[in-house]
Amino acid sequence: MVEVSSYSSAPGSVAFLLHPSTVPVIDVFRSLSSLDDQYDLSLLDGPEQALATYTKPETAKGIVSDALLLAFALTRQRGRPFSHRPIGSRHGSLDEYCLLTLLSSARNPASDVAIEAAAFLDIVSLDFMVALAGDLIRQMDLGAIVFEPPGLTEFRALMGDGPSEEILIEAASGKAEFNFRN
């Protein structure tokens, strides 16, 4: 789901390259700022159509609906907008990486990686957010979009809070998922 590159504009920073099936999910979160300016739900047609290439149209609609609800709740609880890349971009921000980590950790919200991702995102009520994320994950499970959470060591290394190490990320066939291997 995520490829990591050390080639970026700032020294010591990390760039994330999202799997194509992940982009429409993140695009729902990216669209939230546009929805604040003009409440036009047609802005979500693009992500929904893109998701329909990976899952059934009705499941894509459910994913967009649950992602939008989670995006509103996260932004409201956080009190500030997320740092996002442009809609349609495969490049991800640190906030987007943490969001995907939180989503993939929804099945085990007490895990250290879920707690650290939530802390990085300034989420105070993890229980509520995990419940919403769980709804979204259940919708995604109906399709071919699966996120596996990174290990704590990998998460910390990518977030710049831990020892630097090379991480091999394998491509998965069939389903989009995190595959972190040391």
Image (spheres, rainbow, N blue to C red):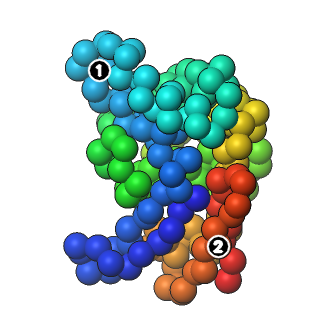
Where is residue 129, by image quadrant? top right
Q: Amino acid at mark 1?
A: Asp
Q: Which mark is residue 128?
A: none
Q: Amino acid at mark 2?
A: Glu
Query: For this view, does 57 lie left or right of residue 43?
Result: right
Q: SS of the residue at dot 1?
A: helix
Residue 131 makes an appearance in the image: no
Q: Position of residue 154 (x, y in %)?
A: 60, 73
Give the mark nearer the N terminus: 1 vs 2. 1
Q: Residue at x 50, y 35 (%)?
A: 50
Residue closest to the eye, 33 or 157: 33
- Of labels 1 and 2, the one closer to you: 2
Residue closest to the eye, 83 or 112: 83
Query: For this view, does 158 lie left or right of residue 101?
Result: left
Q: Residue at x 58, y 31 (%)?
A: 52
Q: Is residue 139 above or below residue 20?
A: above
Q: Which mark is residue 170?
A: 2
Residue 171 makes an appearance in the image: yes
Q: Is residue 79 above or below residue 102?
A: above
Screen quadrant of the N terminus = bottom right
Q: Position of residue 99 (x, y in %)?
A: 52, 47
Q: SS of the residue at dot 2?
A: loop
Where is residue 144, by image quadrant? top right
Label 2 Cα neighbours within 10 Å, binned few <14 / some 14-19 / many ≥20: some
Screen quadrant of the C terminus = bottom right
Q: Residue at x 66, y 34 (%)?
A: 55
Query: For this view, does 160 lie left or right of residue 134?
Result: left
The CA span between labels 1 and 2 is 37 Å
Residue located farthest toward the front when viewing the structure as drawn: 53
Instruction: Give the residue at mark 1.
Output: 36
Q: Position of residue 11 (x, y in %)?
A: 26, 80
Q: Position of residue 49 (x, y in %)?
A: 50, 29
